Image (cartoon, rainbow, N blue to C red):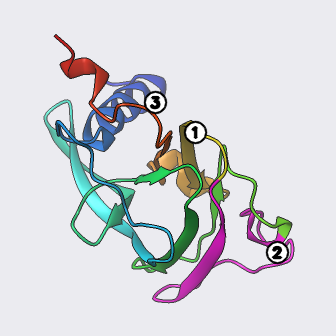
Amino acid sequence: MMKRRDFLKSAFTGAAVLAAPAFSPRPTFAGQSGDQMRLGIIHRTIEVNGKAASVFGLQRADGTPGLRLRAGDAFNVLLRNETAESTIMHWHGLTPPWASDGVPDAPLPLIAAGAQRGYNFPVGKPGTHWMHAHTLQEQSLLAAPLIVADPADDERDVSTAE
């Protein structure tokens, strides 16, 4: 019998693998300054130790998990809740206006099922960050990478360097 701790460990490991962006010699970015990016809160199924598990996810319209932005661009995101549960998102590594920080009811309410909310603020400094729900849905993998690239750097994936 699998223990809860082992299940969660396997689930987070699997989620990390599934959330990793596919190899691309030149990464694609979610949008450019001024363009609105669409990000969906979804339900998805992953395999954990040979069994299907229903979890949450954060995906762009093309099915890519998470967001990849450039420092200096705008965080101009339309977040759509495509699940049957209300939720809200917190953006690590960014400095949004306090109302957009993702704390439930401080001051914005949760995003209702089927509803959407727009965000628009400066992205800020480069780094590898994380975005996640500020609800118990985080334990069901409602989290994804939030990568802010430095436009001055070579955008080749370091794992491909020869």
| Residue nearest the observer in this picture, 150 or 65 | 150
Q: Residue 32: x, y in percent?
A: 42, 66
Q: Residue at x 23, y 63 (%)?
A: 63
Sequence order check, earlier mark of 2 and 3: 3
Residue extent of the magenta highlight: 99-123
C-alpha distance separating marks 3 and 1: 36 Å
Determine the secondary structure under disc 1: loop
C-alpha distance separating marks 2 and 3: 31 Å
Residue under label 3:
4
Cβ atoms under marks 2 and 3 closer than 8 Å = no
Residue type indicated by callout 3: Arg
Q: Residue at x 48, y 25 (%)?
A: 5
C-alpha distance separating marks 2 and 1: 29 Å
Q: Is residue 107 magenta?
A: yes
Q: Residue at x 21, y 16 (%)?
A: 161
Residue type indicated by callout 1: Pro
Few, some or many residues within 10 Å of mark 1 (<14, 14–19, 20+): some
Sequence order check, earlier mark of 2 and 1: 2
Residue type indicated by callout 2: Asp
Q: Residue 152: x, y in percent?
A: 47, 37
Depicted 133 relative to depicted 21: above or below: below
Depicted 81 relative to depicted 130: above or below: below
Determine the secondary structure under disc 2: loop
Residue under label 1:
126
Few, some or many residues within 10 Å of mark 3 (<14, 14–19, 20+): few
Residue under label 2:
105
Which of labels 3 and 1 is toward the front?
Answer: 1
Q: Main secondary structure of the magenta part?
A: loop
Q: Is residue 17 magenta?
A: no
| Residue nearest the observer in this picture, 94 or 82 | 94
In which quadrant will I find the N terminus?
top left
Q: Residue 162: x, y in percent?
A: 16, 10
